[in-house]
Image (cartoon, rainbow, N blue to C red):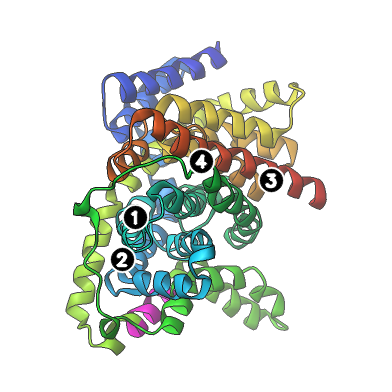
Amino acid sequence: MELLAVVATIVLLIVLIVWLKLHPFLAFLVSSLFAGLMLGLPASEIPSVVEAGIGGTLGGLVTIVCLGAMFGKLVAASGAAQKIAEVLMAACGDKYITWALMLTGFIVGIPLFYNVGFVLLVPLVFSVVYRSGLPAVYLGIPLLAALSVTHGFLPPHPSPTAMVPMFDADMGKTLLLGLVVALPTMILAGPLFAKTLKSIKSEPLKTFIPSDKSSEQLPSGLNCFVTALLPVILIASSTVLPDLATTPQQESLLRFVSHPLVVMLLALMIASYTLGVRRGTSIAALMNHYGEAVKDIAVILLIVAGAGALKQVFIASGVSVTIADVLQGVNINPLLLGWLIATVIRICLGSATVAGLTAAGIMVPVVSATGVDANLMILAIGAGSLMCSHVNDSGFWMYKEYFNLSIKQTLLSWTLMESIVGVAGLTGVLLLNAVLY
């Protein structure tokens, strides 16, 4: 009966989002209340459980995600993204232009959230299209594959960042393992897959050709690369810093410095100087950029909060333990199971963030019961959440309209690219699990 209630809740969530077109946050709230009643929680306690889930999920997440959004906004507004693209394309030349675009998407995509990165970088692709005469899809897919990989696998992006506390994982280790999985995945789904797409012809709308800043207006290449990669450098360093301590006082200080909140705040402060104040941007102008960044991320935070509410209902009702007991008897690798659940929800709902966080809520007790590596589970679910993007995904339509493609062309390029990312990502996670354990 309990498992039927969970299935009914997931079905209700799908119906509310797909058929009734409710905002995912509202759909999560309704589904959470429904799940509480179906699972036998006292009616008077259900609202408190929902509020606890929202507060517990956002408590350690909201600062990191918002700081990450501010950081990404600064990278975009300062011209750092444009400079990184120019440097990489000049270094790689026309022969390896797809590799340059993939690296641009990867480096700039780490601090930028997906939709912002798409809107910012796709026009840069079109500039290359009109200068080189090469097919737009051939040039665009490597960059978009890299953006997708950073979105699904790497902190400080919302979904993997939100899953870290859910699974009691380590953000630094998740990032390092994510990089190991991400690099071969984006190569396979990017430059290598793009070679099969040269026959897809499209004429991107001239509206999307950007008015680039002049070279004099851009920061230096070194400044752009070092600053854009600061979150990666600092978060990765946080995994080893506490081990360097020789006294309790040093350990306490290093743990303070290596906390994700402090890391992201430090990265933003350095970037505010190197890409902002140092180049003549006023503090007031920077604060305006940061205010806009928080507005951009508000909707994602609401979705994360809603997913946290549903997860808490599952925990409070005890159904999480039941799910863990049942799944322990299933002869399937827990990492593959998490990937499959995320894939099914992704196909049904379209949103990678919703798919990832919903699957995580189901798999939390399984990780505890089986002892599987929590960091690898985050990556497996992240890979599943990117699978099979189709007509119910906003990214599908953004790509179709920007590149001026037919539905068939979009399925053959975008949907296949996302599916390659999902399968290659899972393969990388399973190989890492075999090597490490």
| Residue 306 in view here | yes
Where is mark 2, residue-wise?
Answer: 73
Q: Amino acid at mark 4?
A: Met
Residue drawn at the location 45% of the way across and 70% of the way down: 89
Where is mark 3, residue-wise?
Answer: 429
| Magenta stretch in the rendered image | 265-274
Q: Nearer the viewer, residue 110 or 35?
A: 110
Element carrying mark 4: helix
Spot occupied by residue 63 in the image (x, y as percentages of width and height): 38, 61
Label tally: 4
**Residue 373: assigned label:** none
Residue drawn at the location 60% of the way across and 29% of the way down: 340
Q: CA distance from mark 2 to mark 1?
A: 16 Å
The verdict on residue 267 being magenta is: yes
Label 2, residues with CA under 10 Å away: few <14, some 14-19, many ≥20: many
Quadrant of residue 281 within the rendered picture: bottom left
Viewer-nearest of discs 4 and 3: 4
**Residue 122: assigned label:** 1
Q: Nearer the viewer, residue 318 or 285?
A: 285
Q: Amino acid at mark 3?
A: Val
**Residue 417: assigned label:** 4
